[in-house]
Image (cartoon, rainbow, N blue to C red):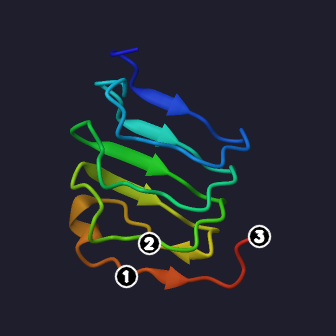
């Protein structure tokens, strides 16, 4: 799995995911964990150089931007109780998390 570039884990009813594993694919650049049942997302330890994460449509209500690894190059958190999305590392510096009211549709 070391050469895996993209991993699609959407629509799996996942409630927890751990990204800091020593078995994490070394070449991974994109991770899709959208449409699951995640309530939290810890991105403090991301063991690859540049990872784009799609975590749309979960149940994430809190997110710590300050402890997020610099290795997260893009993050989509739309349709969650909180949205802290950014598309580029430069945009990340200006991103402010927003509480959302309508995250179900």
Nearest the viewer among 102 and 37 is 37
| Mark 2–mark 1 distance (CA, rounded to whole Å) | 6 Å
Q: For this view, does 47 lie left or right of residue 105?
A: left
Is label 1 in a helix, a strand or a loop? loop
Position of residue 6 relative to residue 105, above or below, is: above
Position of residue 79 relative to residue 52, above or below, is: below
Instruction: Count how many numbered circles sit on residues in the image.
Output: 3
Q: For this view, does 53 lie left or right of residue 16?
A: left
Please name the residue shown 70% across and 73% down the image: 103
Please name the residue shown 54% across and 61% down the image: 40
Is mark 2 in CB contact (under 8 Å) with mark 1?
Answer: yes
Please name the residue shown 50% across and 30% down the image: 7
Find disc 3 in the rendering and name its residue: 104
Is label 2 in a helix, a strand or a loop? loop
Quarter the C terminus occupies: bottom right
Crowd tier of the residue under label 1, counting other residues whose Cα lies within 10 Å: few below 14, some 14–19, many 20 or above = few
Find disc 1 in the rendering and name its residue: 96
Nearest the viewer among 82 and 93 is 82
Find disc 2 in the rendering and name its residue: 84
């Amino acid at each position: 799995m070391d050469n895996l570039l993209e991993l699609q884990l959407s629509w799996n009813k996942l409630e927890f995911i751990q990204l800091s594993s020593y078995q994490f694919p070394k070449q991974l650049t994109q991770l899709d964990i959208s449409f699951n049942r995640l309530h939290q997302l810890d991105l403090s330890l991301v063991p690859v150089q540049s990872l784009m994460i799609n975590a749309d449509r979960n149940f994430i209500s809190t997110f710590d931007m300050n402890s997020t690894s610099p290795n997260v190059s893009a993050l989509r958190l739309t349709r969650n109780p909180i949205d802290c999305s950014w598309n580029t590392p430069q945009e990340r510096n200006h991103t402010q998390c927003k509480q959302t009211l309508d995250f179900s549709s």
